[in-house]
Amino acid sequence: MERDRIEPVAACAESIQFPSELLRQTWFLAGPTASGKTSVALELATRINAEIVSLDSMSLYRGMDIGTAKPSISDRNRVPHHLIDVLDPNEEFSLAEYVSAARVACESIQARGKTPLFVGGTGLYLRGVLRGVFSGPPADWDFRHSLQSQLQVHGIAWLHEQLRAVDAASAETLHPNDTRRVIRALEVQHITGTPLSSQQHQQPLSAADRPPHVYWLSPPRAWLRKRIDQRAEDMIRQGLVEEVRQLSATCDALSRTAGQALGYREVIEHLNGARNLAESVTLIQNRTRQFAKRQHTWFRNLVECREVEIIGTESPRQLAEQLTGKT
């Protein structure tokens, strides 16, 4: 299968959206980390004649395999997968770029007479595909460099206050430490004269426009906690530390996004002497459980998603049969 094309987003302010008809013919299977999505998706794909599109912001990166729990090569041979291993770990990738690339992948899948099936746990990506995303104007590098220079002098609190003065709504949603997005919001207001928050209209789809097959797996918390803890230990046994060491040796610096990946950040800190390996594993487990809670919040707040409660004893085949029986 040929490598997915990563198309650049349009160099102008516009909304990138999936056509309604394409959305209606696309399936989605989301859920928190370690909830068993991959196994269910493989069973589901065989029933709906699907190819899988990754809905995972970290699986985009080459060389980040163990910590992202990517589908195995045999799984990818069984069912074609898209938007996996398309970026180097030092590359950034915006939401608009993801939605644009995902649309290209889905149109290609449909052209082959197959069904696109999104699978993953990145709620921001799911919302972007369902509701569209405002790509914004092209970068004003002189303005960005000016803000970055002032940031070094005045600090992140000052930068955040600059945003609050011109776009209070964006300032409320962006953490002061997220300087990249704070600068982007200031840049959009500077270029367009209009606050970014007033240009982003990611409203829920109306009931009539919602695609019929958007599901998320909702497991019991105690069951998921055990799965998360076991997965962290398994990743260390499978060689996560060596994988991170290899990435560090071959890549000058991970991108801001890749460097925040659960497991990788903690192992990097361990290799830099911040804590021992056992303490790092515990930290991975704690942070992953916190992340899973945030994922639950994402999916519950997306009205387009249908919650599928599971108890943890169902087989992937049973869950796939349950999903294909839904209307």
Image (cartoon, helix red, strand yellow):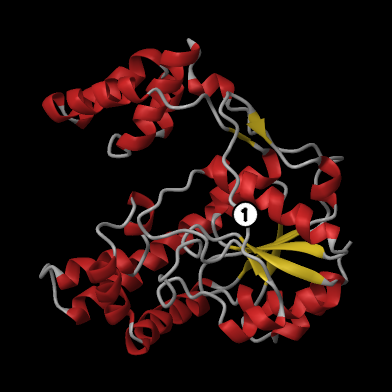
Task: Specify the farthest residue to the top.
Answer: 193
Task: Specify the farthest residue to the front.
Answer: 2
Task: Specify the farthest residue to the bottom.
Answer: 237
Give coordinates of residue 109: x percent, y percent: 78, 61
* Residue, disc 1: 5
Amino acid marked by disc 1 = Arg
Q: Could you say which is closer to the camera, residue 135 or residue 291? A: 135
The residue under the point 85% across, 55% down is: 25
Give coordinates of residue 276: x percent, y percent: 14, 78
Quarter placement of the C terminus: bottom right
Mark 1 lies on a secondary structure that is loop
Q: Could you say which is closer to the camera, residue 91 or residue 201? A: 91
Q: Is residue 320 left or right of residue 243?
A: right
The residue under the point 28% across, 81% down is: 242
The answer to whether residue 302 of the structure is visible from this angle is: no
Corner quadrant of residue 207: top right
The residue under the point 56% across, 61% down is: 121
Q: Is residue 121 left or right of residue 287?
A: right
Quarter placement of the N terminus: bottom right
Q: Could you say which is closer to the camera, residue 242 or residue 318? A: 242
Q: Does residue 18 sit above or below 43 in this rendering?
A: above
The answer to whether residue 10 of the structure is visible from this angle is: yes
Give coordinates of residue 56: x percent, y percent: 54, 61
Q: Is residue 301 left or right of residue 274?
A: right
The residue under the point 65% across, 70% down is: 81
